[in-house]
Amino acid sequence: MDNTTNGELSLMTQKLLETYEELTLIYDLISKIGGMLDLTKVFDKVVDEAVTTSKVKWGGIFLIDELNGKLELKASNPVDKIPQKLIEYSCEKGLINQAIQSARSIIGSEMDSFIMVVPLKAKDTQIGVIYLCNKMDGDSFYSTELKLIETLGFIVSFIIENARLYLSLQQLFFSAIESLSFAIDEKDSYTHGHSKRVTQYSLEIAETLGLPEEEKTILKLAAVLHDVGKIGIPETILHKKGKLDYEDWEEIKQHPMKGVHILQPMEESQAIMTPVDIRFKDIHAIIDGVKYHHERYDGKGYPEHLIGEDIPLVARIIAVADAYDAMTSDRAYRKGMSNSDACMELKSNAGQQHDPAIVKVFLKLKGKG
């Protein structure tokens, strides 16, 4: 075999090894961050991977702040050895600045350090950089290493772009929910702001109970939507000036199930986008909050006569918040109760209508515990 053939085989082998390394890096990274929607965790994983792969002393991800246009450090490794002066110089007029202005990756040196900068782009807009500083062996960076980090940059750019789209959809989702809920409240001047107050009280209870963020998000959505089924109740009943008769109450008692029917497509259709910190399986928990917020702790509620802790926690919390707001709000046929009287009523119904533990927490929040 002649030298030319040997050289070609050697080159092919080298390219195959580089491709293998690149594919391995992509597989490892996607397996670690593929299911993540928390950008902070994504950035940490990407920086760790970049630092490990390139064997450098320091690495970081910088993003351009959308409001002031300044670069902000979002993740670094190691976190306690940030080359501050070098970073400041690089951002202002060094390699970071050059990489962003040119939209090209750069290998170079500044302030006695070997540097690699890979720009991050979303829809052809510069959004930040991956920055690596000084290899452990003291060598400069190679083009093969640059290619690997550019692959990382492509992946993280894609994730950032999707996360921002997801965030805008989240905001749209919340806005649509709030608009629907508030439209229901506006149907009756006496219930104006009811859903907002119930949500506020519910979240105060959740905070005191120390519920995790995911459960608080579920609770927030369920509380905002708890009366969504009233959109299917005749206005003649909702706006009735006198007390409701038996038939009226039987109609009103349908609103939790009407709410379920309105929200059911969210659970059945995987096409509905949900907030960043909500999974499709949790939509069921939101619907349960709407469905069961009129169950009673003693089993005499509706629609399914659940007892005690068989009632989902979200629904038990909303039930207390809803009852308090109903008692303290004016109605066409009566004035609202004072805080003291409403709290006394909650206390007398603890263990019967309401979860006594939740009532106890709420009374403390209202200064009556």
Image (cartoon, helix red, strand yellow):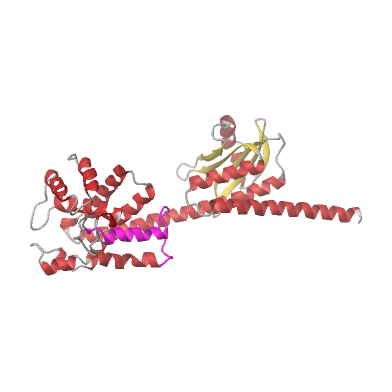
Residue 276 colored in magenta in the image: yes
Vertical placement of 168 versus 72: above or below? below
Seen in the image, is 280 located left or right of residue 95?
A: left
Q: Is residue 193 visible?
A: no
Q: Is residue 205 visible?
A: yes
Q: Position of residue 153 (x, y in %)?
A: 59, 49
| Magenta stretch, residue numbers | 269-295
Q: Position of residue 4 (x, y in %)?
A: 88, 54
Seen in the image, is 328 located left or right of residue 24?
A: left
User: Residue at the location (55% across, 42% down)?
Assistant: 61
Vertical placement of 238 versus 77: above or below? below
Seen in the image, is 254 located left or right of residue 93?
A: left
Q: Position of residue 209 (x, y in %)?
A: 30, 44
Number of numbered tags placed on the structure image:
0
Question: The C terminus appears in which quarter of the rendering?
Answer: top left
Q: Position of residue 234 (x, y in %)?
A: 18, 69
Residue 135 colored in magenta in the image: no
Looking at the image, which is closer to me, 137 or 250?
Answer: 250
Residue lying farthest right?
Answer: 2
User: Residue at the location (73% across, 52% down)?
Assistant: 17
Kindly indicate the quadrant of the structure image that contains residue 281: bottom left
Looking at the image, which is closer to me, 242 or 295?
Answer: 295
Question: The N terminus appears in which quarter of the rendering?
Answer: bottom right
User: Residue at the location (26% across, 60% down)?
Assistant: 292
